[in-house]
Amino acid sequence: MSVGLVKRVVGGVGARKTILRQLLDGAQTGLVLRSAIARGVSKPVDEVSDAMLYFNLQHLENHGLIERVRYGKEKAARLIPRFVQSVRRFLEIETPVAYLGAVSDEPRVLTVIPKRLRAETSYRPVKYHYFIEDRMRHRLSGVTPDQEFHEVPSSIYNNELDQMYGLVVNLGEQLIQEYAILVDVSGASRVCALALYRLAIEFDLSCVFITELGAPCWLRE
């Protein structure tokens, strides 16, 4: 979902903006959301009606931005993960960046690509996540604390797009709660690159390809 679509769903309604902003911190109960709306309009909590709260929650749910979940013994609302970055963009909220890419046959991308990103772009990831074939683990050396590797069987990494995408989405949904994700398809196999690019499209993420000359080619900004 693009920022423009989020804007149309919100429709300039302050309560909806407040709800979305609050849900960026995770699932929230109606009581918490009611208190946030009250602060936003400078009114006592008891003056925020059920109609104001639940009508706007229902509106956001009907348009696919949020869902209702169990939160202990209560019901709560939460942002659907694939819309988190669109909401952040709409509300102009910046978060730390996590890099999400892959390593196939050339381990040097672990040092080359971060250097090119720092030299050629404004991105400064605080964490680097890489999908790798299970056969690559023994070829990786000099791993730093900000690097994390996610091993994938070669049969999936190179041939099974649906399964590869499932792994990519699972990690993406975890990272998006805390980070803005920068997707890089430079070092990936064809199947892994397609899965990463699909994630970038569906989650409204920036996506880059670093050419052999070291120049960033933006597939999505």
Image (cartoon, helix red, strand yellow):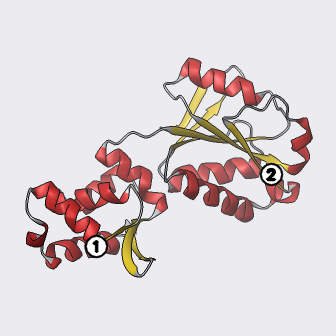
Q: Which mark is residue 151?
A: 2
Q: Amino acid at mark 2?
A: Glu
Front one among 84 and 105: 84
Q: Position of residue 25 (x, y in %)?
A: 39, 55
Q: Image height check: is 48 above or below 179?
A: below
Residue displayed at 15% across by 55% down: 40
Residue 13 visible in rendering: no
Gap in angstroms between the C-alphas marked 1 and 2: 40 Å
Please tell me in which quadrant of the rendered image residue 165 appears: bottom right
Q: Earlier in the sequence, mark 1 or mark 2?
A: 1
Please indicate whether residue 122 sits to the left or right of residue 49 in the image.
right
The residue under the point 43% across, 58% down is: 83
Residue 17 as seen in the image, left or right of residue 82: left
Image mark for residue 30: 1
Front disc: 1 or 2 = 1
x, y percent for residue 122 = 48, 25
- Judged from the image, the secondary structure of the residue bearing numbered disc 1 is helix
Q: What amino acid type should be assigned to the residue bearing mark 1?
A: Gly
The residue located at (69%, 59%) in the rendering is: 167
Residue 194 x/y as whole percent: 67, 51
